[in-house]
Amino acid sequence: EVPLDIVLKELEQRDSADASRAMAPLKPADDSIEIDTSCLSIEEQVSVLYDYVIDLLKETNCLSEQFYHPEQSCLSEQSCHSGLDPESNKLDSCLRRNDKRIRLAKHSGYCFGVRRAIQLAIEAKESNSKVFSLGELIHNPKIVSELQEMGIEVINQAAGVSNSTVIIRSHGISKQDFELLLQNNNTIIDATCPYVKRTHELIGNMAQEGCPIIILGDAHHPEVIGMLSYGNNQTIVMAPDDPIPANLGSKVCLISQTTQKLEDLQRVICQLIPQVVEFRIFNTICLATSQRQDSATELAKDSDLMIVVGGYNSSNTRALASLCHQLCPTHHIESEEELDKINLVDYKRIGICAGASTPQETIVKVFNKIIEKSGESGIAKCIEDIPLFKEESC
Ligand code: F3S
């Protein structure tokens, strides 16, 4: 029966005392990883941790099948890595001998939100004869069509579906559509990514406080349409290149679509600061997005050509392509077939990165096609065979 503000105050006092004491002050280790668990269930927290551990094991070449369960479809990721694989070492040294470097950005492909959405969809289909997905579950045409073949039908409107099982896509739907689905007696499987859910909650809270809200993002993207629906009549969407809206009051809240570029958010913050007195900023760019952007940028700086793999309608893939494009010639492709039109022979250092809804299988196919077109020998059987940037044995 203690009021929230008292609990909050006491927690803050305790944290401040712990962090500022002279003897062994409480502070995170320099190499610790911070995970915001505010809006994650226990299962989701475990899933985020699992991704970290898998990445760490991949980095240290310690991933074995005992940690990873290979399956045959690209709906569930494959892996064939078995520690220090002599085959992959052979592949890497072969590439180095010919002075050609083909490397993958450290964070590439499926994020936890996408993996979770696919898993929920498959589970829903296993226990229901008919399942609808309101909008495409993820922004990857190949996966959407595989799910459709399994019997998960994409519908584009909430109106007209009743007494059915409906899965909500990873980038969420509008508040009104959600309510309509419930009113029509549907069973909802909510695969909205928890990072997107958090933006809904934050916007809802700010709207209730009567605060004008600016959403930084693409007004036509379903995620942003969903976010907007939680706002008030003073909520607007601003694209990164738009001018700062005129007639801003003294108070404003800025919140970002989860897949925006951090540099754009930083720029808009700097533009807004002189205009307002009270400024609330929520950096809601998701962890998977920032990791993919950082590792793609790092790789692009050390490459002559970047190949960015992912759906054309995928906002996070487009952001990767735009970042890489600033650093070296870049091609955004959806599948390996598109490499036929691209000159690869003249480039010595080719980097590959992939958006958060790109399956490993596609990344492997792209890598192998680049090897083939470059006149190199050796193919990758799975993603762990592809040299990661800064981790290939130089
Ligand atoms: Fe979620 Fe970020 Fe992936 S918002 S769906 S974890 S790209």
Image (tube, rainbow, N blue to C red):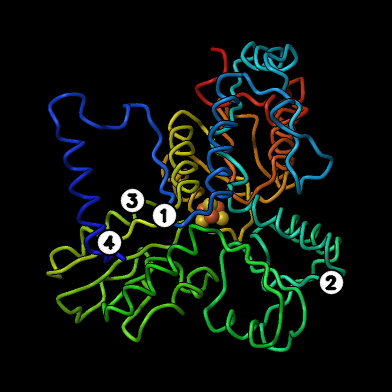
- The nearer-to-camera label among 1 and 4 is 1
Q: Is residue 35 above or below residue 100?
A: below
Q: Which residue is mark 4?
A: 281
Sequence-wise first label, 1 or 3: 1
Judge depth for marks 2 and 3 and give the one in front. 2
- Residue holding disc 3: 263
Disc 1 CB within 8 Å of nearest ligand 1 atom: no
Specify which label sits upstream in the sequence, 4 or 3. Answer: 3
- Mark whose residue sits in front, 1 or 3: 1
Sequence-wise, which precedes: disc 2 or disc 3?
2
Q: Secondary structure at mark 4?
A: strand
Tags 1 and 4 touching, CB below 8 Å: no
Report the label total.
4
- Vertical order, 81 against 342 (above or below): above
Cα gap from disc 4 to disc 3, whole angstroms = 14 Å
In percent of the image, x 66 and y 83: which residue is there? 158
Q: Is residue 1 above or below residue 375?
A: below
Q: Is residue 291 left or right of residue 372?
A: left
Q: Amino acid at mark 1?
A: Ser
* Residue at point 15%, 69% (across, down): 278
Q: Amino acid at mark 3?
A: Glu
